[in-house]
Amino acid sequence: MKVTRLASAMVAAAFGLGSFAALADVAAPQDVPYQGTLKINVDATDIAHRIFRVHEVIPAAPGPLTLLYPEWIPGNHSPTGPISKLAGLVVKANGTTLPWTRDQFNVYAFHVDVPQGASGVEVDFQYLSPLSQREGRVVMTPEMLDVQWSANTIYPAGYFARQINTEPSVKLPTGWQAGTALEVASRDGDTLNFKPINYDDLVDSPIFAGKYFKRVDLDPGASTPVHIDIVADDPKFLEIKPEQLKVHQNLVQQMYKMYGAHHYDHYDFLLSLSEKMGGEGLEHHRSSEDGTGTDYFTDWEKSALGRDLLSHEFNHSWDGKYRRGADLATPNFNVPMGDSLLWVYEGQTQFWGQVMAARSGMWTTDQTHDMLAFVAATYDQGRPGLASWRNVQDTTNDPTIAQRSPLPYRNYQGSEDYYSAGQMIWLEVDSKLRELSGGKKTIDDFGKAFFGVNPGKWDVDTYTFEDVTKTLNGIAPFDWASYLRTRLDGHGSLIGGIASHGWKLVYTDKPSAAVKAIEMRRHAADLTYSLGVSVGKGGDIGDVLWDGPAFKAGLSPGMTIVAVNSHDYDADALKDAVTAAAKDRSQPIELLVKNFDEYQTIRIDYHGGLKYPHLMREEGKPDTLTALLKPR
Ligand SMILES: [Zn+2]
């Protein structure tokens, strides 16, 4: 879509037909106050059909008016506004229906003509929740719903979003309760009327509502309240043990100790425990949408894997929402976002998400080490594309390129690697700061200096690459620009932080608890670092490491392994075959494979045995990783 529009603009320019903006016929946003207030009512009561019904009163002067449906969604960093789920658009003025036209070159824009004598338009439409995950993230179930204002509003073109004032309200199913960063002005039955808020902050303030609801105080007695608002498929999932509550409360304090300031006047984690509503992790300034499985509290061991979710999303209030890459801080939701600094926004948040999971006690030391080994192995051997053709910087374009769609050869193509590769880079930056300062300075100092500024402020404070290096230089003078650019733009190792913290990455034939949990969650056998293949339920091949042993033997994603050494496939049989072939080089690994409707026998000449990543201490070198992970 982007290319088409650009090409059209170039054609237009060549023929003297005017600029791109004129071609799309959408007024550019101006930093001037919008006259009047957008009145927005969302009726979220039709849980049987999973339909949100939206009614808006939009003040406007007579003449041409362009209404926009948000396209570029904050936190997604990409044009993912669910325009295909918008239906039933009717625009009226003074009770008369007005014809609307969708812009030919911008399908998120609708043109209408406001008649003389009218003071604006009234708009009705439905936002249709996906009914299955196949259609997108399900946001309405019999027990809960998620009102995302970006999906449930349209707004006038021509203004910065923060210059448009709104009065929102939502009608919930009978008796449901809600959590949100929005402040309630009044409750009228099941309708919540919120205090006026500008459109930018409205879109940043979703609502989780549910039949089964619990609100938990994470900072009792604090002048700036922090809560978790939990909705669940069943009340039994809302039970929280005191030690579970404690580590969530620790998280808040550990963040405060590191940053020394926060950028909200209150904060609400919106947490859904559901197998029906789609999972989510979406950051906002004063809240976050955190969607996880039902067993988050009730099967604490099993849910360990994803338990850096809340620390990750919470960290974004500082890194991403308050401090934001200058090219990402767009004036409204229909201006393309620039993602060049996502290795800070997401990369350092990935780093702190895991470090804070350790410092707060959400993860044990072993769990943290296992996850770190898993990530380090990915950037040691699991991303051959980053070593050969693509760099970390280029992956920051991936939210726009792939929008998280499945990829044929993800390990070679690369995807949103700025998250975990970014995490590895920041781990190494921490050890470099320690080295340069003789152990006096760490990445905590960077966090405080870069993100922990201007306590209580929660507008947007933008930054550039030069601002990042300047702050690092202020902490420990060094050629940080070259240091970072080498890692972002090059094809060298990204895991130097493991060794410089006094540890090493090793591979053994025993999977860590984390790898076992990942295998269980994905219903897959993860043989990435041995055979170079990951095999799902029933032998379906999920991923094949580019140029790995399985790849070279002719396996590819999409095939199904039917038999291993002439016996029915199961994951253990495959692992046993790998082990046997390591002990006796005459032992084959012979797979009967189905490819579309053809069967073929593939022999893999691999005798290296099973290999799973672990961290091990490098004796004789100082252990600064333990210092990094220790609670403050
Ligand atoms: Zn994130």
Image (cartoon, rainbow, N blue to C red):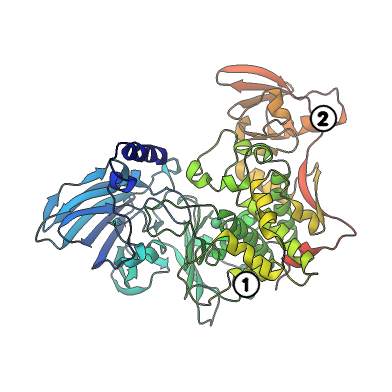
Snapshot quadrant of residue 172: bottom left
Residue that appears at 26% across and 64% down: 38
Circles 1 and 2 in contact, beta carbons < 8 Å? no
Q: Position of residue 201 (x, y in %)?
A: 39, 66
Q: Nearer the viewer, residue 626 or 398?
A: 398
Mark 1, secondary structure of its residue:
helix
Q: Which residue is mark 1?
A: 448
Mark 1 is surrounded, within 10 Å at the Cα level, by few (under 14), some (14 to 19) or many (20 or more) other residues, namely some
Q: Looking at the figure, which quarter contains the C terminus?
A: bottom right
Q: Nearer the viewer, residue 409 or 613?
A: 409
Q: Nearer the viewer, residue 268 or 37?
A: 37
Q: Nearer the viewer, residue 204 or 509?
A: 204
Q: Position of residue 567 (x, y in %)?
A: 71, 23
Which of the four quarters of the rendered structure image does ligand 1 lie in?
A: bottom right
At label 2, the amino acid type is: His
Q: Could you give the CA–CA distance between mark 1 and mark 2, rounded to whole angstroms?
A: 49 Å
Q: Which residue is mark 2?
A: 607
Q: Position of residue 370 (x, y in %)?
A: 73, 53
Snapshot quadrant of residue 612: top right
Q: Looking at the figure, which quarter contains the N terminus?
A: top left
At label 1, the amino acid type is: Lys
99 to the left or right of 15: left
| Residue 474 visible within the image | yes
Residue that appears at 56% across and 74% down: 453
Mark 2 is surrounded, within 10 Å at the Cα level, by few (under 14), some (14 to 19) or many (20 or more) other residues, namely many
Mark 2, secondary structure of its residue:
loop
